[in-house]
Amino acid sequence: MNLILFSRDEVQAPLPRSDPRAQHLLHHLKRGRGERFDAGLIDGPRGKGWIEEFHSDRLQLNFVWENAIPPCSPLVLVVGLPRPQTARRILREAAAFGIEAILFFAADKGVASYRTSKLWAGNEYRQRLIEGAEQAFSTRLPQVALHDTLGEALAALPAGRDRIALDVYEAEASLSTLKTLQAEATLAVGPERGWAAGERDLLRQAGFRLAHLGDRVLRSDTACICGMSLVLAARGKL
Amino acid sequence: MNLILFSRDEVQAPLPRSDPRAQHLLHHLKRGRGERFDAGLIDGPRGKGWIEEFHSDRLQLNFVWENAIPPCSPLVLVVGLPRPQTARRILREAAAFGIEAILFFAADKGVASYRTSKLWAGNEYRQRLIEGAEQAFSTRLPQVALHDTLGEALAALPAGRDRIALDVYEAEASLSTLKTLQAEATLAVGPERGWAAGERDLLRQAGFRLAHLGDRVLRSDTACICGMSLVLAARGKL
């Protein structure tokens, strides 16, 4: 936790001592009354927080916020739903890179049970986003959606943008040599077992260029980090 | 395991059925007599293997190898020794990218106990390399060394090369805009708590340029993947 994030609701109310952020402030950062810590408002500005009052069951915090809201990185990820442990890392690292959105979809070659993981049942996926943003001193949480098919995910995408899909087998060029057409990009990363033929057709119909990362088959989470790095760097955002 | 790796010794001898590779061939790939699988010789060629004979306690394998040996990616990583779980990921992903070597060093702001982990006591670190290479269809295992200080690691580096160190605080430019001076590169990534002032001096004396990855503070393993991606892409190797 390099930055401690709060929602707008939370900054109005006292913070229960049982909250992991209160524990972090008291036992890890060891902040006394009035001592500043790095804080952020989710999807808002960064700033400084401090403990105003100590109570037996809660802390009364106060904040001062900067004026500027840090921008998102101009990227949407479309990802074949991977096993939960891999999805956790993708959520966390996508939030660290501060991208706009992640659209997961149940891929033809995916595994149906991945969707029933507890990661998606409650609030856990959001916790992974917060963890990544806090690590990176970012306040922006990517929007997250789960779609039943690639087609449904593509229909939900913002119009236009530079559309690129990673593919080991039918790529026209390497991602790093692909010409940047627009400042904003959408990057699609297949499921662990690769794209189905019908999914490749859908991608091409939707204007995606297929690109590879050399002849190496990277894990889904590594391909996402590598892909985000190259796409953002090509747009001067890294 | 996209590719099953063997050392030169191992391809001469029968494979015990208790070996995880035998289990993978029999129960996951379900190979019968003579049915081919993707194999690789560590630091040698790729090829095909097959089970020649089934015995109660072992498999007699046979192989046919390609002529060419896949090249390494022209990169050496120098990394402040992180917690073992992070080191495991760096080892695995560096092997997936097929880089030449990883030199870990006990950083001034590091944690001494990381070095006594069971990861480093026996063969486990090598297993993580094999796992990464197998994932990426690569046969090359990075050389791995543990040094007591950054100075000792720098003294062990190959001479020359493009030397770049990641640094959030005193970087002259972003890694993605840094001019490529040489085809072969050395990339230094600090420990989780950052470089000490003396370490920055050592890096500068050794000809390292300091570069950042934007204003985001990435985890060590993510910074390594992001850094490897950008350095290799800039050299046409990704």
Image (cartoon, coloured by chain):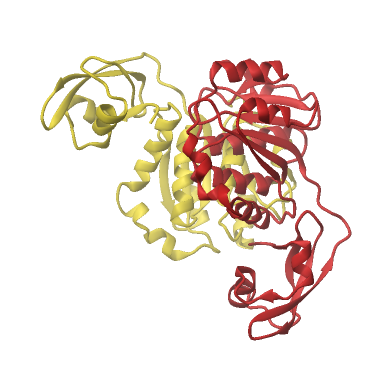
Chain colours: A red, B yellow
Q: Position of residue B39 (x, y in %)?
A: 33, 23
- Residue at point 38% right, 31% down? B1
* In front of the other: A197 or A168: A197
> With respect to residue B33, does A102 lie above or below?
below
Q: Position of residue B106 (x, y in %)?
A: 48, 58
* In front of the other: B70 or B152: B70
- Residue at point 64% right, 73% down? A22
Which residue of the protein is positioned furthest toward the right in this rendering? A67
* In front of the other: A176 or A38: A38
Which residue of the protein is positioned furthest toward the left in this rendering? B56
Q: Position of residue B92 (x, y in %)?
A: 45, 41
Q: Is residue B210 visible?
A: no
- Report the quarter where the C terminus of chain B lies: top right
Q: Is residue B128 visible?
A: yes
- Residue at point 42% right, 64% down? B113
- Residue at point 60% right, 36% down? A224
> With respect to residue B220, does B97 lie above or below?
above
Image side of residue A83 versus residue B232, left or right: left
Q: Position of residue A17 (x, y in %)?
A: 63, 77
| Total numbered labels placed on residues in the image | 0
Image side of residue A159 versus residue B72, left or right: right
Image side of residue B158 versus residue A20, left or right: left
> With respect to residue A194, does B200 lie above or below?
below
Classify residue B8 by image quadrant: top left
